[in-house]
Amino acid sequence: MLQDITIGQYYPADSPIHALDPRTKLKAVFFFIFCLFWVNNIYGFIFAGVFLSSVVLSSKVPVGYVVKGLKPVLFVVSLTMLMSILTIPGDEAFRIFVFKGTWQGLRQAGIMAARIFMLISSASMLTLATSTIDLTDGLEALFLKIPLLKRFAHDMSMMMCIALRFIPTLVDETDRIMKAQMSRGADFQSGSFAQRAKSFIPILVPLFVSAFQRAYELAMAMESRCYTGGEGRTRMKLLEYTKLDYTANVVMVIVFCSMVASGVLVNR
Amino acid sequence: MMIQVRGVRYKYDSDSDSYAVDGIDLDLAQGEFVGIVGHNGSGKSTFAKMLNGLILPTEGSVNVLGMDTKDEKSLIQIRRNIGMVFQNPDNQIVATIVEEDVAFGVENLGIEQTKIRGIVDSALTSVGMYSSRLKKPHQLSGGQKQRVAIAGVLAMNPRCIILDESTAMLDPNGRAEVITTALRLNKEEGVTVVLITHYMEELVNADRIIAMENGKIAFDLPPAKAFSDSGRLRSLRLGVPEIVQIASILRENGIPIRENTLDVEGLVEDICQLK
Amino acid sequence: MSIEVRDLTHIYAQGTVFEQMAIEDVSFDVGAIDFIGVIGPTGSGKSTLIQHLNRLLAPTKGTVIVNGIDVNSKSVPMREICKRVGIVFQYPEYQLFEETVYKDVCFGPKNLGFDKEKIDFLAKESIELVGLDFETVKDLSPFELSGGQKRRVAIAGVLAMKPQILVLDEPASGLDPAGRADLLDSIQKMNKELGICIILVSHNMDDVAHYCDKVMVFSKGRLLRYGRTAEVFADSDFLLSSGLAPPQSKQLLIELKKRGIPVDDSVFSIEGAIDEILKWHSSLAGK
């Protein structure tokens, strides 16, 4: 299950989608999701679907990766689909025993499924085609543009960066502690749920102790390298928009406008 | 004088009577290579952290290039001049990419963006890690991580680098990498190096060795003199390099070995003189 | 024989792009009261090897038999393996978690299902064995001890399971020279006085030369040499070519021999080196 989650994974490849500025990609995903909630008819979803598929195809990320990302939400989506088909009142479309399915329910279920699937796929696509550092930098740059979030921009990106830096270290550490306790006869597999939960204490306590120790040492190391927060810091790498980003912006404006327009036009 | 330490004492717990550092006077000159030794708990790491103001003295003063570490406004200047590399290589690398980490300190100083790239590249080249600049920290060996940490300090163009037990967690190859790098920086670029370690053989090339015991300086001598009294070293719970042991016994047996012969090459030379 | 390893191979992430051969066709026997040193550069497969001795890793190929039982046989519970093989990992102080030293040391024997009296006895015995005073430390929190004491408590926690074989990965790393010698002396005592088989993984050739009766040399996942320490360390060319730094006394003799001074470079102790040089020196005077 854990390895099915593709949001947050990076798939390195040489593609125009990878080469886009992270800010462009972040904005794109934000507006795409916004538009998805605006759209409520088949034409809008066709626009969205064609756009999303062409992004996936040109990113050189195997389609399977993106599809795999949908697996964790499959159950929830099917359940809510079923609920809306059966509960939304309207004209009867089919009947099984006492259950009545309505056309209105079917339509609503379809829209909802399309929205959630495309939402998840676009978010997976963002992280699959953007390295974590770019993502952090992009978020920081965008936050700086928003007056309310400006104050937190640097702290947020610093925290994300440190978290990403220490994930592999802490994974190794967990593995090591687990093996050490197994060598002392600890058993994590058998017993009741409560027993199993309790058996993790010998892993969690040392892990926390060491994480705090690391945090303390890291803070000291950062301090001795003159870190005093975001104020007055410069950056080695600056994000720069290229021709590709401008092109992408034009494409996005057209697609998003069409999505929104289709909703407005059909509803009229 | 680059660093002046006067009557410094420090205790972790204000209620207790025991001082981790208990009355130290010391001068460090530009370009020196100084070793600080002492068993676990002798106060050497606490003392080292006082040199760049990470720990402020309870009594006495630490003066760096004319600035007092107690003066908060000087701390940034003090820390960019006195770089510090710590023991655990994993707990001092901040960024997810080697070159980004080396840039960290420089960025903190607010150096112009156009200059950072060049500074970072030359610091990485100086420790021999330029070809690994795009790697992730967990793909590196312990010795390589410590060299990245040194580069990160070096990029701030410090006058002095303190290696606070930076070799303790490394294998022999990693230790050699770090020591060779520190020696080169000292000899070729004139950077003052303060090397805190348990391994006496890392200090045969030092200008002086300072031994600590109970928060005080037990002795402050050039290596040849420091190693000459093995009884004193053992009473301080310190080791004696094998070559020094061999040389002193050979001397006792009437073979003329020079007093300042401390490493394999030197001893080979001395013995070949006898042929 | 207490350990029989046959054709042991371990490949990490087999079948993926990350596939990596960690150890390859390793076979050896270990006697019941041996004191064995395992040396080799970082990444030579030492730590992969020791994790096979108590089933933390399953071999890709090959078998591991410890005191007559097949470590990887499904019918053998992990508990039975822990009674035979104790592993002390590098920086074992990171496994401490209980409120008191006593409770922490009891964790292992409790897991093995020993009765209360036995656990009590074993905890006391092993804390004393690692050179700590039971009454002084038993009610302290392990987190308020010094680094060296934490290390000892962690080792006691493994010893308390009464293993017949004790595997230690770099037990002395990070300790000061005196602490290092004290700890290794305690380990030697466990071997000589209690008859526990010791497998000591170390980077430090000096320690191995001083304490171990036999030595295994690993390089790139292969067991290059296994024999009496004196014999393996006598072979200077081999030591240099395997990427290990011989003790300084040995480096000295190797260099002297290169410079045409007739000394025996198979010697690897300080006393031996001195004897060799003095012998040569007096022969010089005789001429």
Image: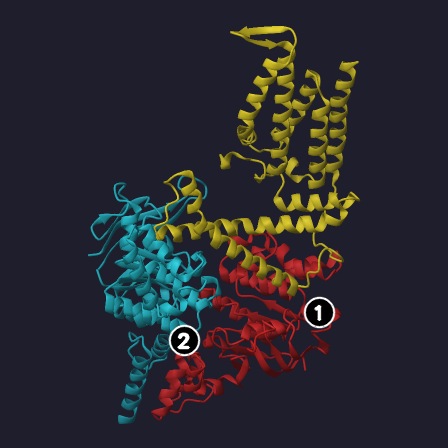
Which dot marks residue B75? Answer: 1
Label 2, on which residue? C178
Q: Chain of mark 2?
A: C
Residue A53 in view: no
Mark 1 lies on a secondary structure that is helix
**Residue C10: x percent and y percent?**
35, 47
Chain B shade: red
**Residue C158: x percent and y percent?**
34, 58
Which chain did the image draw in cyan?
C
Residue C181 in the figure: left or right of residue A246: left
Structural distance between the alpha carbons of marks 2 and 1: 37 Å
Residue B207 vertical placement versus A122 (above, below): below
Q: Report the residue at 37% width, 78% height from top.
A: C252
Quadrant of the rendered image containing residue B110: bottom right
Residue A162 in view: yes
Mark 2 lies on a secondary structure that is helix
Chain A shade: yellow
Q: Report the residue at 63% width, 76% height from top.
A: B190
Q: Mark 1 belongs to which amino acid?
A: Leu
**Residue C155: x percent and y percent?**
37, 62
Quadrant of the rendered image containing residue C183: bottom left
